[in-house]
Amino acid sequence: MESRGYKASHALRMLRQLYAANGRDARSSVRMPAGLNELVHATFSPQTASLALRQVAADGTSKLLLRLADGRTVESVLMPDFHPARAAGCISSQVGCAMGCDFCATTQTGFERNLTAGEIVEQFIQLRGEALAAGRTLRTVVFMGMGEPMLNLRNVLAAVQRMADPTLGALGWRQITISTVGIVPGIDSLTEADLGVHLALSLHAPDDATRADLLPMGRRFDVRDVLAAADRYQARSGRITTIQYCLLEGVNDSLAQARDLSRLLAGRPMRVNLLRYNPTGLSLRGRSYAPSSMEKTDAFLGELRAHGTVAHLRRARGSDIDAACGQLRRQTAESTPAER
Ligand code: SF4
């Protein structure tokens, strides 16, 4: 700003204009020196990604495949809330993923690169526009799309700062959730960052053997250490950690496993989000996972609650589109250019 003859304080006003106002064009409401808006918009591109594909499910969930400046693609999802005026966004932190979780479609196309902070924020801005077009406000953002956020934490935190810094006015810290497959040093770095965002931990099994079979990272960080790291985060941030648990038929959905999970969480003020698996075809190791039946799901939920665990069943979203993480991108990569 100074090199162009403006005051440095105009930078913050310009950023507020870009990030706040819930995506509506704030140019009319923020007073700027003559010519500054035009200069900024002529100098910087407000957008570097383009929409490669968009799918909308019957339940209103919309999934965007964004093409980045280097031609690679990432997925972002907008999910309507029960509240008719609100929506939640799910964004990606990496192109592809190296974590190798057996049931996940993203990892099947491998890891390509980390997203920049700008590319992460751009997904937020795209989803915010998508929400506005649907008559809703984007109220929460979860880092549960492609990639492991803890392995790109520097850029994830830079993006979170832009989305949730109160001086910029787009969201608040509490409106953001960072999810992890259980990278202990990453959780500790997040604790050190002390931003007050929510933490979600993908546990998926109460014992090390089942967990390590599903998530290779489970061999490196055992359940006890991962939960201890979440305890430290919770103690520092005061935020309740969410335990993500995707129910797979015959793998992790027995009543004994529900009781083991309750035992693990006893005395920990954490809550469990049960998810029903969204089938993605053959797994990384050629297995065919199936979602637990509704009866088994209800029984698992009941057993958790009977043992004093706070637990909820998350609604499946967009099951009539490729809404599981990585599906749309994989399907697009497999199709011919003519089909696309
Ligand atoms: S579930 Fe998440 S961490 Fe695991 S492979 Fe898929 S994108 Fe990566």
Image (cartoon, rainbow, N blue to C red):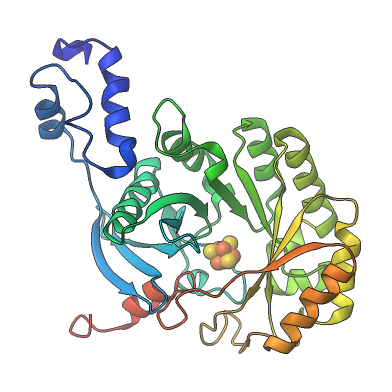
* Point 37% across, 80% down: residue: 331
Which residue is drawn at the image coordinates 60% and 79% (left, top)?
277
* Residue 286 versus residue 100 in the image, above or below: below
| Front residue (pair 240, 156) | 240
In the rendered view, would you say 163 is above or below 228?
A: above
Residue 151: where, in percent of width, then height?
56, 49
Q: How many marks?
A: 0
Residue 143 in the image: state x and y as whole percent: 52, 53
Q: Quadrant of the C terminus?
A: bottom left
Ligand 1 shows up in the quarter that is bottom right
Q: Is residue 330 above or below residue 228?
A: below
Q: Position of residue 304 (x, y in %)?
A: 83, 70
In this view, the residue farthest toward the front is: 84
Residue 99 in view, yes or no: no
**Above or below, 172 relative to 327:** above
Q: Quadrant of residue 64?
A: bottom left
Residue that appears at 27% across and 31% down? 17
Quarter where residue 180 is shown? bottom right
- Towards the viewer: 98 or 244: 244
Residue 253: image location, x then y, percent: 77, 80
Q: Is residue 131 visible?
A: yes
Q: Which of 182/258 is in front?
A: 258
